[in-house]
Amino acid sequence: EKGNYRHFMQKEIFEQPTVVAQTLGSYLRQADNSVALPQLDFDISEIRRLTIVACGTSYYAGMVAKYWFEHFARVPVDIDVASEFRYREPVLEDGGLALFISQSGETADTLAALRHCKANGQVIGVVVNVPTSTMAREADLLLPTHAGPEIGVASTKAFTCQLAVLAALAAHMAVKKGLMNREEEQSVVSHLLETPACLNAALDHDDDIASMAHLIAPARDVLYLGRGQDYPLAMEGALKLKEISYIHAEGYASGEMKHGPIALIDDEVPVVVIAPSGPLFEKTVSNMEEVRARGGKIVLISDAEGLEEAGEGCMATIEMPKVHPLIAPLVYAIPVQLLAYHVAVVKGTDVDQPRNLAKSVTVE
Ligand code: F6R
Protein backbone atom coordinates (compact mmCIF):
# COMPACT_ATOMS: atom_id res chain seq x y z
CA GLU A 1 0.00 0.00 0.00
CA LYS A 2 2.96 2.30 0.57
CA GLY A 3 4.06 1.81 -3.03
CA ASN A 4 7.57 3.16 -3.48
CA TYR A 5 7.46 5.09 -0.24
CA ARG A 6 9.15 4.12 2.96
CA HIS A 7 6.38 5.38 5.23
CA PHE A 8 2.71 6.31 4.95
CA MET A 9 3.57 9.79 6.14
CA GLN A 10 5.97 10.24 3.24
CA LYS A 11 3.41 8.90 0.77
CA GLU A 12 0.76 11.21 2.17
CA ILE A 13 3.05 14.26 1.96
CA PHE A 14 3.64 13.49 -1.70
CA GLU A 15 -0.07 12.96 -2.40
CA GLN A 16 -0.83 16.57 -1.54
CA PRO A 17 -0.77 18.07 -5.05
CA THR A 18 -3.34 15.47 -6.12
CA VAL A 19 -5.65 15.55 -3.11
CA VAL A 20 -5.55 19.34 -2.75
CA ALA A 21 -6.50 19.57 -6.45
CA GLN A 22 -9.37 17.12 -5.83
CA THR A 23 -10.57 19.11 -2.85
CA LEU A 24 -10.31 22.47 -4.62
CA GLY A 25 -12.08 20.95 -7.61
CA SER A 26 -15.17 20.35 -5.53
CA TYR A 27 -15.35 23.92 -4.20
CA LEU A 28 -14.17 25.98 -7.19
CA ARG A 29 -15.36 26.15 -10.78
CA GLN A 30 -12.40 26.27 -13.10
CA ALA A 31 -14.45 27.18 -16.20
CA ASP A 32 -15.19 30.69 -14.95
CA ASN A 33 -12.87 30.93 -11.91
CA SER A 34 -15.69 31.13 -9.40
CA VAL A 35 -16.34 29.72 -5.95
CA ALA A 36 -18.93 26.93 -6.03
CA LEU A 37 -20.04 25.85 -2.59
CA PRO A 38 -22.86 23.38 -2.01
CA GLN A 39 -26.31 24.96 -1.69
CA LEU A 40 -26.57 26.33 1.86
CA ASP A 41 -29.90 26.35 3.67
CA PHE A 42 -29.00 29.50 5.59
CA ASP A 43 -27.87 32.92 4.41
CA ILE A 44 -24.12 33.09 4.96
CA SER A 45 -24.09 36.86 4.38
CA GLU A 46 -26.15 37.19 7.57
CA ILE A 47 -23.59 35.41 9.74
CA ARG A 48 -22.39 37.89 12.34
CA ARG A 49 -19.79 35.83 14.10
CA LEU A 50 -17.68 32.78 13.43
CA THR A 51 -16.52 30.35 16.10
CA ILE A 52 -13.82 27.89 15.04
CA VAL A 53 -13.04 24.88 17.22
CA ALA A 54 -10.59 22.01 16.61
CA CYS A 55 -7.61 20.17 18.09
CA GLY A 56 -3.95 19.79 17.11
CA THR A 57 -3.11 20.22 13.47
CA SER A 58 -6.77 20.86 12.59
CA TYR A 59 -6.70 23.76 15.07
CA TYR A 60 -3.72 25.26 13.24
CA ALA A 61 -5.67 25.05 9.98
CA GLY A 62 -8.39 27.01 11.76
CA MET A 63 -5.86 29.61 12.92
CA VAL A 64 -4.73 30.18 9.34
CA ALA A 65 -8.35 30.43 8.23
CA LYS A 66 -9.04 33.10 10.84
CA TYR A 67 -6.77 35.42 8.85
CA TRP A 68 -8.73 34.67 5.68
CA PHE A 69 -12.19 35.13 7.23
CA GLU A 70 -11.12 38.44 8.73
CA HIS A 71 -9.31 39.64 5.63
CA PHE A 72 -11.82 38.63 2.96
CA ALA A 73 -15.16 38.30 4.74
CA ARG A 74 -14.62 40.86 7.53
CA VAL A 75 -16.35 38.62 10.05
CA PRO A 76 -15.25 38.46 13.70
CA VAL A 77 -13.66 35.10 14.46
CA ASP A 78 -13.26 33.38 17.81
CA ILE A 79 -11.02 30.33 17.73
CA ASP A 80 -10.05 27.89 20.43
CA VAL A 81 -8.85 24.35 21.01
CA ALA A 82 -11.82 22.14 21.78
CA SER A 83 -10.62 21.04 25.21
CA GLU A 84 -10.53 24.68 26.36
CA PHE A 85 -13.60 25.88 24.49
CA ARG A 86 -15.91 23.39 26.14
CA TYR A 87 -14.93 24.29 29.67
CA ARG A 88 -15.07 28.06 29.42
CA GLU A 89 -18.24 30.03 28.98
CA PRO A 90 -18.12 31.18 25.35
CA VAL A 91 -20.68 33.83 24.52
CA LEU A 92 -22.71 32.37 21.67
CA GLU A 93 -25.25 34.76 20.24
CA ASP A 94 -27.93 33.90 17.71
CA GLY A 95 -26.76 34.35 14.16
CA GLY A 96 -23.40 32.66 14.68
CA LEU A 97 -21.75 29.98 12.58
CA ALA A 98 -19.62 27.45 14.45
CA LEU A 99 -17.03 25.60 12.37
CA PHE A 100 -15.45 22.36 13.51
CA ILE A 101 -12.36 21.07 11.75
CA SER A 102 -11.37 17.43 12.08
CA GLN A 103 -9.67 14.83 9.95
CA SER A 104 -11.37 11.92 11.71
CA GLY A 105 -14.67 13.61 12.53
CA GLU A 106 -14.60 11.69 15.83
CA THR A 107 -12.31 13.67 18.16
CA ALA A 108 -14.13 13.61 21.51
CA ASP A 109 -13.50 17.18 22.63
CA THR A 110 -14.33 18.65 19.22
CA LEU A 111 -17.55 16.64 19.08
CA ALA A 112 -18.56 17.77 22.57
CA ALA A 113 -17.91 21.40 21.54
CA LEU A 114 -20.05 20.87 18.44
CA ARG A 115 -22.96 19.61 20.54
CA HIS A 116 -22.56 22.53 22.93
CA CYS A 117 -22.73 25.01 20.05
CA LYS A 118 -25.72 23.25 18.55
CA ALA A 119 -27.57 23.42 21.84
CA ASN A 120 -26.75 27.14 21.91
CA GLY A 121 -28.32 28.01 18.59
CA GLN A 122 -25.29 28.08 16.32
CA VAL A 123 -25.36 26.92 12.72
CA ILE A 124 -22.97 23.94 12.64
CA GLY A 125 -20.42 23.66 9.84
CA VAL A 126 -17.88 20.85 9.73
CA VAL A 127 -14.74 20.34 7.68
CA VAL A 128 -14.03 16.61 7.95
CA ASN A 129 -12.10 14.03 5.99
CA VAL A 130 -14.32 11.10 6.93
CA PRO A 131 -17.74 11.80 5.41
CA THR A 132 -19.43 9.03 7.41
CA SER A 133 -18.11 10.33 10.74
CA THR A 134 -20.20 11.43 13.70
CA MET A 135 -19.38 15.11 13.12
CA ALA A 136 -20.44 14.84 9.49
CA ARG A 137 -23.79 13.37 10.55
CA GLU A 138 -24.47 16.09 13.10
CA ALA A 139 -23.64 19.05 10.84
CA ASP A 140 -25.95 21.54 9.19
CA LEU A 141 -23.25 22.25 6.63
CA LEU A 142 -20.90 19.43 5.65
CA LEU A 143 -17.73 20.51 3.87
CA PRO A 144 -15.70 17.37 3.19
CA THR A 145 -11.98 17.36 2.46
CA HIS A 146 -11.08 14.87 -0.25
CA ALA A 147 -7.70 13.81 1.12
CA GLY A 148 -8.47 10.08 1.07
CA PRO A 149 -7.62 7.88 4.06
CA GLU A 150 -4.80 9.29 6.18
CA ILE A 151 -2.87 6.43 7.79
CA GLY A 152 0.21 8.13 9.26
CA VAL A 153 -0.59 9.34 12.75
CA ALA A 154 0.96 12.73 12.00
CA SER A 155 -1.57 14.67 9.96
CA THR A 156 -0.24 16.05 6.66
CA LYS A 157 -2.52 15.90 3.64
CA ALA A 158 -5.65 16.42 5.75
CA PHE A 159 -4.18 19.76 6.88
CA THR A 160 -3.59 21.20 3.40
CA CYS A 161 -7.00 19.95 2.25
CA GLN A 162 -8.63 21.63 5.26
CA LEU A 163 -6.89 24.87 4.26
CA ALA A 164 -8.20 24.47 0.70
CA VAL A 165 -11.81 24.14 1.91
CA LEU A 166 -11.48 27.00 4.38
CA ALA A 167 -10.01 29.35 1.76
CA ALA A 168 -12.93 28.58 -0.57
CA LEU A 169 -15.44 29.14 2.25
CA ALA A 170 -13.87 32.48 3.22
CA ALA A 171 -13.99 33.62 -0.42
CA HIS A 172 -17.60 32.43 -0.75
CA MET A 173 -18.60 34.38 2.33
CA ALA A 174 -16.86 37.49 1.00
CA VAL A 175 -18.69 37.17 -2.34
CA LYS A 176 -22.06 36.73 -0.61
CA LYS A 177 -21.41 39.72 1.64
CA GLY A 178 -20.62 41.86 -1.39
CA LEU A 179 -17.04 42.35 -0.22
CA MET A 180 -15.45 40.58 -3.17
CA ASN A 181 -16.44 41.60 -6.67
CA ARG A 182 -16.42 39.27 -9.66
CA GLU A 183 -12.95 40.33 -10.73
CA GLU A 184 -11.48 39.80 -7.27
CA GLU A 185 -13.22 36.43 -7.02
CA GLN A 186 -11.67 35.35 -10.32
CA SER A 187 -8.26 36.43 -9.13
CA VAL A 188 -8.55 34.62 -5.77
CA VAL A 189 -9.85 31.45 -7.42
CA SER A 190 -7.13 31.44 -10.06
CA HIS A 191 -4.49 31.75 -7.33
CA LEU A 192 -6.04 28.88 -5.40
CA LEU A 193 -6.01 26.78 -8.54
CA GLU A 194 -2.26 27.38 -8.84
CA THR A 195 -1.73 25.58 -5.52
CA PRO A 196 -1.16 22.02 -6.78
CA ALA A 197 1.61 23.14 -9.15
CA CYS A 198 3.23 25.15 -6.34
CA LEU A 199 3.00 22.14 -4.01
CA ASN A 200 4.86 20.12 -6.63
CA ALA A 201 7.54 22.79 -6.85
CA ALA A 202 7.88 22.68 -3.06
CA LEU A 203 8.15 18.88 -3.09
CA ASP A 204 11.05 19.17 -5.54
CA HIS A 205 13.16 20.28 -2.58
CA ASP A 206 12.75 16.94 -0.80
CA ASP A 207 16.40 15.96 -1.38
CA ASP A 208 17.73 19.27 -0.06
CA ILE A 209 15.63 18.90 3.06
CA ALA A 210 16.70 15.27 3.53
CA SER A 211 20.33 16.31 3.35
CA MET A 212 19.99 18.98 6.05
CA ALA A 213 18.06 16.76 8.49
CA HIS A 214 21.26 15.68 10.22
CA LEU A 215 21.79 19.32 11.27
CA ILE A 216 18.55 19.26 13.27
CA ALA A 217 18.53 15.66 14.49
CA PRO A 218 21.08 16.16 17.34
CA ALA A 219 19.22 19.18 18.75
CA ARG A 220 17.45 19.03 22.09
CA ASP A 221 15.24 22.03 21.37
CA VAL A 222 14.13 23.67 18.14
CA LEU A 223 12.26 26.95 17.76
CA TYR A 224 9.97 27.76 14.84
CA LEU A 225 9.12 31.36 14.03
CA GLY A 226 6.45 32.79 11.75
CA ARG A 227 4.39 35.94 11.45
CA GLY A 228 0.79 36.54 10.43
CA GLN A 229 -0.71 33.55 8.65
CA ASP A 230 2.69 31.82 8.86
CA TYR A 231 2.60 31.89 12.66
CA PRO A 232 0.20 28.91 12.84
CA LEU A 233 2.59 27.12 10.48
CA ALA A 234 5.40 27.67 12.95
CA MET A 235 3.28 25.91 15.57
CA GLU A 236 2.39 23.17 13.12
CA GLY A 237 6.09 22.69 12.31
CA ALA A 238 6.93 22.40 15.98
CA LEU A 239 4.08 19.94 16.58
CA LYS A 240 5.13 17.74 13.65
CA LEU A 241 8.75 17.70 14.81
CA LYS A 242 7.98 16.87 18.42
CA GLU A 243 5.42 14.18 17.70
CA ILE A 244 7.53 12.12 15.31
CA SER A 245 11.15 12.90 16.21
CA TYR A 246 10.62 13.48 19.98
CA ILE A 247 12.71 16.65 19.83
CA HIS A 248 11.29 19.42 21.97
CA ALA A 249 10.06 22.21 19.69
CA GLU A 250 8.04 25.39 20.09
CA GLY A 251 6.35 27.61 17.56
CA TYR A 252 6.35 31.32 18.27
CA ALA A 253 5.14 34.48 16.62
CA SER A 254 8.36 36.07 15.35
CA GLY A 255 7.68 39.29 17.24
CA GLU A 256 7.25 37.44 20.54
CA MET A 257 10.86 36.21 20.52
CA LYS A 258 12.19 39.13 22.48
CA HIS A 259 9.48 38.70 25.11
CA GLY A 260 11.01 35.56 26.50
CA PRO A 261 12.04 32.71 24.24
CA ILE A 262 15.15 34.54 23.06
CA ALA A 263 16.63 33.59 26.44
CA LEU A 264 16.84 30.02 25.13
CA ILE A 265 18.94 30.89 22.12
CA ASP A 266 22.52 29.69 21.92
CA ASP A 267 24.49 27.82 19.31
CA GLU A 268 22.77 24.55 20.20
CA VAL A 269 19.27 25.69 19.31
CA PRO A 270 18.25 25.63 15.65
CA VAL A 271 15.63 28.24 14.75
CA VAL A 272 13.44 27.50 11.76
CA VAL A 273 12.11 30.73 10.26
CA ILE A 274 9.08 30.52 7.96
CA ALA A 275 9.00 33.75 6.02
CA PRO A 276 7.90 34.26 2.44
CA SER A 277 9.05 37.63 1.03
CA GLY A 278 6.46 40.37 1.37
CA PRO A 279 5.46 43.33 3.51
CA LEU A 280 6.24 41.59 6.83
CA PHE A 281 9.57 40.18 5.71
CA GLU A 282 11.74 43.05 6.97
CA LYS A 283 10.36 42.67 10.45
CA THR A 284 11.15 38.97 10.47
CA VAL A 285 14.67 39.67 9.20
CA SER A 286 15.30 41.88 12.19
CA ASN A 287 14.04 39.09 14.48
CA MET A 288 16.50 36.78 12.71
CA GLU A 289 19.31 39.23 13.39
CA GLU A 290 18.48 39.08 17.09
CA VAL A 291 18.74 35.29 16.97
CA ARG A 292 21.97 35.39 15.01
CA ALA A 293 23.56 37.89 17.38
CA ARG A 294 23.16 35.25 20.10
CA GLY A 295 24.77 32.51 18.10
CA GLY A 296 21.46 30.93 17.04
CA LYS A 297 21.55 28.70 13.97
CA ILE A 298 18.88 29.63 11.47
CA VAL A 299 17.09 27.51 8.90
CA LEU A 300 15.33 30.00 6.65
CA ILE A 301 12.38 28.84 4.55
CA SER A 302 11.59 31.54 2.02
CA ASP A 303 11.42 32.27 -1.72
CA ALA A 304 14.32 33.36 -3.94
CA GLU A 305 13.78 37.01 -3.12
CA GLY A 306 13.76 36.37 0.64
CA LEU A 307 16.80 34.11 0.50
CA GLU A 308 18.68 36.65 -1.58
CA GLU A 309 18.02 39.27 1.04
CA ALA A 310 18.50 37.26 4.23
CA GLY A 311 19.87 33.82 3.36
CA GLU A 312 23.47 34.72 4.04
CA GLY A 313 24.77 33.46 7.35
CA CYS A 314 21.99 30.92 7.80
CA MET A 315 22.88 27.36 8.79
CA ALA A 316 20.60 26.16 5.97
CA THR A 317 17.99 27.55 3.60
CA ILE A 318 15.01 25.97 1.86
CA GLU A 319 13.80 27.70 -1.28
CA MET A 320 10.09 27.84 -1.99
CA PRO A 321 8.51 29.06 -5.21
CA LYS A 322 7.29 32.67 -5.14
CA VAL A 323 3.57 32.31 -4.43
CA HIS A 324 0.54 34.48 -3.81
CA PRO A 325 0.21 35.20 -0.04
CA LEU A 326 -3.18 33.45 0.07
CA ILE A 327 -1.69 30.08 -0.81
CA ALA A 328 1.59 30.47 1.06
CA PRO A 329 0.36 28.49 4.11
CA LEU A 330 -0.45 25.50 1.90
CA VAL A 331 2.87 25.63 0.09
CA TYR A 332 5.01 26.26 3.18
CA ALA A 333 3.35 23.31 4.93
CA ILE A 334 5.39 21.03 2.66
CA PRO A 335 8.93 21.93 3.83
CA VAL A 336 7.71 21.96 7.43
CA GLN A 337 6.32 18.42 7.06
CA LEU A 338 9.35 17.16 5.13
CA LEU A 339 11.78 18.58 7.66
CA ALA A 340 10.03 16.76 10.53
CA TYR A 341 9.82 13.61 8.45
CA HIS A 342 13.50 13.50 7.51
CA VAL A 343 14.68 14.36 11.02
CA ALA A 344 12.59 11.46 12.36
CA VAL A 345 14.08 9.16 9.72
CA VAL A 346 17.61 10.21 10.75
CA LYS A 347 16.69 9.53 14.38
CA GLY A 348 15.18 6.18 13.47
CA THR A 349 11.87 6.70 15.25
CA ASP A 350 8.62 5.01 14.25
CA VAL A 351 7.39 7.70 11.87
CA ASP A 352 3.92 6.31 11.19
CA GLN A 353 3.16 5.14 14.72
CA PRO A 354 4.85 7.57 17.12
CA ARG A 355 4.85 6.52 20.76
CA ASN A 356 1.91 7.51 22.97
CA LEU A 357 -0.23 8.75 20.07
CA ALA A 358 -3.40 7.46 18.43
CA LYS A 359 -4.82 8.44 15.08
CA SER A 360 -8.23 9.22 16.42
CA VAL A 361 -8.59 10.67 19.90
CA THR A 362 -12.02 9.52 21.02
CA VAL A 363 -11.39 9.92 24.73
CA GLU A 364 -11.23 13.28 26.46
C1 F6R B 1 -0.97 16.03 14.60
C2 F6R B 1 -2.21 15.30 14.70
C3 F6R B 1 -3.18 15.65 15.79
C4 F6R B 1 -4.59 15.81 15.20
C5 F6R B 1 -5.61 16.06 16.32
C6 F6R B 1 -7.00 16.30 15.78
O1 F6R B 1 -0.20 15.57 13.55
O2 F6R B 1 -2.47 14.44 13.92
O3 F6R B 1 -2.78 16.82 16.45
O4 F6R B 1 -4.57 16.87 14.30
O5 F6R B 1 -5.64 14.92 17.17
O6 F6R B 1 -7.51 15.21 15.08
P1 F6R B 1 -8.75 15.35 14.13
O7 F6R B 1 -8.37 16.28 13.02
O8 F6R B 1 -9.04 13.97 13.63
O9 F6R B 1 -9.89 15.92 14.94
Image (cartoon, helix red, strand yellow):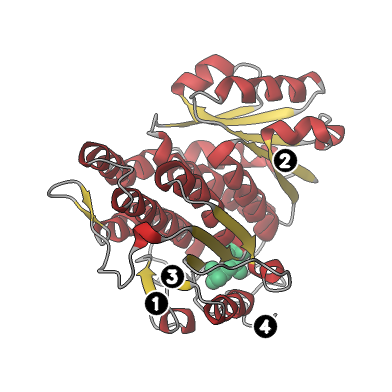
What separation in Å lies between label 4 and label 3 (alpha carbons)? 22 Å
Quadrant placement of the C terminus: bottom right
> Closer to the N terminus: mark 4 or mark 1?
1
> Closer to the N terminus: mark 2 or mark 1?
1
The residue wearing badge 1 is 140
Say what amino acid the circle numbered 2 marks: Leu
**Element at badge 2?**
strand
Q: Against 124, is 155 above or below?
A: above
Task: Indicate which label's residue lies in the foreground, 2 or 3.
Answer: 3
What separation in Å lies between label 2 and label 1 (alpha carbons)? 40 Å
Report whether 302 appears left or right of 177: right
The crowding category of the residue bearing disc 1, from other C-alpha atoms within 10 Å (few below 14, some 14 to 19, many at least 20), is some
Please report the residue visible at 66 percent of the width from the left and 26 percent of the height from the top: 315
> Quick check: marks 3 and 1 in contact, CB under 8 Å?
yes
Give 363 or 354, whichever is nearer the viewer: 363
Task: Indicate which label's residue lies in the foreground, 2 or 1.
Answer: 1
Q: Position of residue 239 (x, y in %)?
A: 66, 55
The residue wearing badge 3 is 125
Give 218 or 71, whichever is nearer the viewer: 71
Using the rendered view, name the quadrant where residue 352 is placed: bottom right
**Element at badge 1?**
loop
Q: Position of residue 225 (x, y in %)?
A: 66, 37
Say what amino acid the circle numbered 1 marks: Asp
> Closer to the N terminus: mark 4 or mark 3?
3
As drawn, the label of residue 363 is 4
